Image: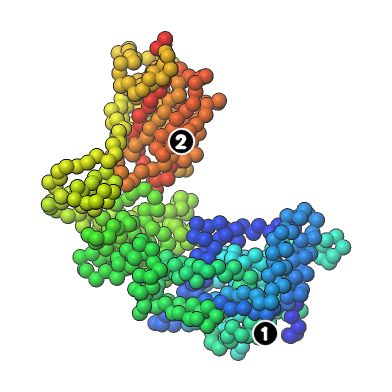
């Protein structure tokens, strides 16, 4: 094997800079630093060597004088910049990169793990041979070779979270297994293709590798990074150059650890060291409570209280759960821990975790799922092997949701398990409902009710005494009328609401209905016009729900302009479960749509909806599931009609 190292430019398909798996982490809701923490720690936890001991992950920040093969690397960026097909699109970005390469000290983030297996396959590397964990880590996108089927990561794109935090989109690897006699190293940069008719190759791929001249991994550590510590035991080091070291960089790492790995740290599966140029801090189960108190959000503090709950009456174990003769959950496989406090308002959500303890998301993601009248914060711990395998099957690539419609259809056992988990959590919370006491729980009313003993502007707590006097009305809210002629949307025959009355295929006006403006007046418009509640004058209402889109058809018995539809979730009288209408559309051409919170207004001054003409709207909501609505319709009716 040659010891000479070089950046390799290989022929490939012409590709631009915007690699989808990198952009996903740049634009994710977590933020690029949080995604980096989540993906790297998850990858380390998935390859633990000794499960009886915690995995240790180290984030180390330092500076180096130059990068491996820096002159060649700079030349590659310039060749990309000068490639004509890109029409100068990358000029500004590459100028920033060259400025970083020209620094006297280049910032580096090193992410290392210990008590892990390391990436196997470098010692007997064969470009055309079988896949290995070394290849999956250092040169293949979308592949992973983790040994456990319930591993948290298995899509092979998490490593691109590292590229999302540096303009260079570059990282270097060093890894060693127990069988290797020394570490192996390699570099990998993803950007855009070099396109040059006079070059060989004329078109490169968008991946560039720092290897030996005979296309092998480098059989030692990289000299340029020696001041950041040597690899002396199995595990992996990842070097990410050119990061932007903002003043909050370290705090972002700490907050991301608490947000995603609270359970892993508390259960002693993980310890983390953060070394900022010699200033080192360790986070482990022994000092986690202090870190949570200093850096945790109010929600994280509540989840930590639930996780450390010791009261057996607030800890629930899911009973045996079977599906088609197959046991999916055995006693002890799923534990639900609940925290309640009279002094701290709960999240009314459950943090969902599994296996290694990494957070998936919070349930419900939107809207409400648990019974009203009880305040709480909870953590769900799924530790059983079979349950983990099934839930892994329905996770999205970012590992942040089990609620993926296509995957739920493809894995019926996993779908049944997910439904069972939700039922188990809801039933556990319902069992905590208090018996009749001297208090009324009034969640969400603290904005409306004022305790006269408090200073002006102070809010009362959610729990209010039964005997209330001198209530000052701070705000009045006119509720949506529940009076309707055809029942809630979605409640009719076959789920389609009340069918339209027909006679010979034509609409028939109700003989006993005589529209009159004296009924349910709302407000007066211009001369000859008046807005009224026209809900009683709807001959039928139909609805359907397909692929998260609600479609509603309303057939009026009066000719109306500018109809406004106001929706309310059936049975929902709580002020803390508001929903918003999204992406509203109307089928009638030339009619403008205005959507605000739970209402849709159609601007149709010049083209009224005539008697029997359907008003058809399609919309989405930010609620978690399909729901049934009450609907109220207000419209402008011309007196001459």
Name the quarter where the C terminus is drawn.
top left
On the image, the x and y values in percent for residue 583 come to 49, 39
Task: Report, in whole angstroms, how far the alpha carbon at label 1 lies from the one at label 2.
Answer: 60 Å
What's the residue at 42%, 45% (across, down)?
Answer: 622
Which residue: 25% across, 58% down?
A: 428
Crowd around label 1: few <14 · some 14–19 · many ≥20 (10 Å)? few
Question: Residue under circle 1?
Answer: 223
Of residue 506 and residue 22, the one placed in the foreground of this image is 22
Where is residue 204 shown, x and y percent of the image? 76, 64
Find residue 564 and report its horizontal and vertical position in percent: 41, 28
Name the image quarter holding residue 11.
Answer: bottom right
Rendered residue at 44%/79% (across/down): 282
Q: Is residue 538 visible?
A: no
Q: Position of residue 450 (x, y in %)?
A: 23, 46
- Is residue 42 toward the left or the right of residue 204 in the image? left
Q: Which residue is at a point 36% across and 48% down the rendered structure image? A: 367
The kind of secondary structure element at disc 2 is strand
The N terminus sits in image quarter: bottom right
Q: In this view of the protein, can residue 473 be seen by the observer? A: yes
Is residue 156 shown above or below 572?
below
Q: Relative to residue 502, is residue 149 depicted above or below?
A: below
**Mark 1, secondary structure of its residue:** helix
Q: Nearer the viewer, residue 466 or 310?
A: 466
Label whose residue precedes the other's in the sequence (1 or 2)? 1
Compared across the picture, whether 633 is left or right of 24 comes to left
Checking the image for residue 595, the label placed there is 2
Vertical arrangement, residue 65 with respect to residue 554, above or below: below
Residue 608 lies left or right of residue 449; in this view the side is right
């Amino acid at each position: 094997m040659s010891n000479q190292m070089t950046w390799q430019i290989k022929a490939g398909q012409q590709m631009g800079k915007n690699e989808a798996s990198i952009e996903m982490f740049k634009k994710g809701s977590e933020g690029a630093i949080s995604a980096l923490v989540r993906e790297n720690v998850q990858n380390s936890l998935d390859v633990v060597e000794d499960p009886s001991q915690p995995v240790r992950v180290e984030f180390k920040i330092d500076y180096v004088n130059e990068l491996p093969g820096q002159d060649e690397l700079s030349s590659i960026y310039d060749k990309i910049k000068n490639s004509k097909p890109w029409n100068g699109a990358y000029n500004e970005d590459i100028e920033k990169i060259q400025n970083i390469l020209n620094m006297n000290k280049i910032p580096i983030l090193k992410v290392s793990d210990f008590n892990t297996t390391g990436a196997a396959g470098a010692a007997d590397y064969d470009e055309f041979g079988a896949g290995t964990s070394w290849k999956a880590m250092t040169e293949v996108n979308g592949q992973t070779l983790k040994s456990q089927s319930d591993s948290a990561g298995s899509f092979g794109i998490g490593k691109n979270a590292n590229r999302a935090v540096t303009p260079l989109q570059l990282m270097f690897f060093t890894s060693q297994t127990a069988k290797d006699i020394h570490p192996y190293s390699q570099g990998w940069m993803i950007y855009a293709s070099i396109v040059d008719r006079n070059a060989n190759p004329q078109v490169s791929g968008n991946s560039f590798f720092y290897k030996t001249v005979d296309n092998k991994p480098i059989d030692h550590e990289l000299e340029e990074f020696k001041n950041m510590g040597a690899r002396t035991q199995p595990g992996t080091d990842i070097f990410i150059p050119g990061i932007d070291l903002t003043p909050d960089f370290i705090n972002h790492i700490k907050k991301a650890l608490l947000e995603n790995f609270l359970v892993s740290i508390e259960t002693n599966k993980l310890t983390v060291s953060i070394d900022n140029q010699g200033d080192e801090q360790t986070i482990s189960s022994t000092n986690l409570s202090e870190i949570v108190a200093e850096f945790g959000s109010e929600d994280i503090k509540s989840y930590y209280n639930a996780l450390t709950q010791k009261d057996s009456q607030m800890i629930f174990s899911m009973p045996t759960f079977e599906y088609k003769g197959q046991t999916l959950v055995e006693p002890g496989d799923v534990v639900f821990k609940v925290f309640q406090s009279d002094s701290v308002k709960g999240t009314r959500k459950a943090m969902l975790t599994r296996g290694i303890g990494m957070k998936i998301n919070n349930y419900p993601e939107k809207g409400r799922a648990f019974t009203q009248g009880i305040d709480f914060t909870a953590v769900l711990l799924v530790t059983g092997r079979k349950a983990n395998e099934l839930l892994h099957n329905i996770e999205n690539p970012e590992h942040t949701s089990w609620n993926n419609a296509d995957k739920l259809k493809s894995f019926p056992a996993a779908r049944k398990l997910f439904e069972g988990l939700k039922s188990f959590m809801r039933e556990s919370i319902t069992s905590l409902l208090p018996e009749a006491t001297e208090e009324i729980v009034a969640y969400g009313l603290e904005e409306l009710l004022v305790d006269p003993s408090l200073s002006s502007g102070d809010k009362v707590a959610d729990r209010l005494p039964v005997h209330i006097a001198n209530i000052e009305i701070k705000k009045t809210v006119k509720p949506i009328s529940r009076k309707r002629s055809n029942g809630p949307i979605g409640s009719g025959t076959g789920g389609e609401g009340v069918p339209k009355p027909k006679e010979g295929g034509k609409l028939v006006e109700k003989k006993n209905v005589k529209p009159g403006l004296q009924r349910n007046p709302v407000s007066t418009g211009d001369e000859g016009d008046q807005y009224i509640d026209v809900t009683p004058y709807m001959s039928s209402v139909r609805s359907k729900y397909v692929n998260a889109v609600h479609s509603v058809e309303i057939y009026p018995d009066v000719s109306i302009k500018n109809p406004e539809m106001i929706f309310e979730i059936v049975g929902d009288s709580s002020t803390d479960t508001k929903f918003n209408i999204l992406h509203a559309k109307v089928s009638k051409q030339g009619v403008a749509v205005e959507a605000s919170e739970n209402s849709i207004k159609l601007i149709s001054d010049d083209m009224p909806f005539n008697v029997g003409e359907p008003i058809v709207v399609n919309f989405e909501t930010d609620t978690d599931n399909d729901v049934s609505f009450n609907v109220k319709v207000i419209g402008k009716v011309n007196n001459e009609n």
